[in-house]
Image: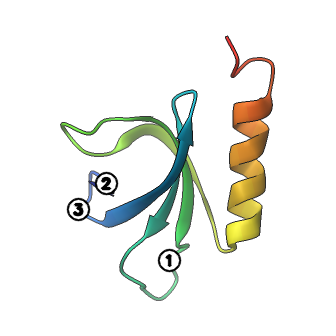
């Protein structure tokens, strides 16, 4: 599934759980981190409530797993 950020950038949805989404930017740009862990995706208007971006997939995946495996995320 492809989603758009508020600035029009397209991201591929890699994984989702408990309102968190692991995304990969489809277009590679200089000085742009290609992976994001987003919270509460807004598929209608584009974007999300908050996100953290990462250079490395493994870092992004670990952050995603940390958010979705935490006791707070299980509520």
The kind of secondary structure element at disc 3 is loop
Q: CA distance from mark 2 to mark 3?
A: 5 Å
In this view, the residue in front, 1 or 39, is 1
**Are circles 2 and 3 on residues that touch, CB within 8 Å?**
yes
Q: Residue at x 68, y 59 (%)?
A: 60
- Percent of width and height locating residue 9: 29, 66
The kind of secondary structure element at disc 2 is loop
In this view, the residue in front, 12 or 7, is 12
Q: Residue at x 71, y 57 (%)?
A: 61
Q: Residue at x 74, y 49 (%)?
A: 63
The circle drawn on residue 5 is 2
**For residue 20, what is the image quadrant?**
top right
Residue 5 horizontal side relative to residue 15, left or right:
left
Above or below, 12 relative to 50: below
Q: 10 Å neighbourhood of mark 1: few (<14), some, or many (≥20)? A: few
The kind of secondary structure element at disc 1 is loop
- Percent of width and height locating residue 35: 56, 65
Tell which circle, 1 or 2, labels the residue nearer the N-terminal end. 2
- Percent of width and height locating residue 64: 68, 46
Residue 22 horizontal side relative to residue 45, left or right:
right
In this view, the residue in front, 74 or 52, is 74
Above or below, 69 relative to 10: above
Residue identifier under label 3: 8
The circle drawn on residue 62 is none
Residue identifier under label 1: 32
């Amino acid at each position: 599934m492809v989603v758009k950020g508020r600035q029009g950038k397209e991201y591929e949805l890699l994984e989702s759980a408990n309102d968190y989404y692991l995304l990969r930017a489809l277009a590679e740009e200089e000085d742009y981190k290609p992976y994001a862990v987003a919270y509460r995706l807004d598929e209608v208007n584009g974007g999300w409530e908050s996100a953290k971006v990462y250079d490395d997939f493994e870092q992004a995946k670990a952050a995603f797993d940390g958010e979705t495996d935490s006791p707070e995320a299980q509520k």
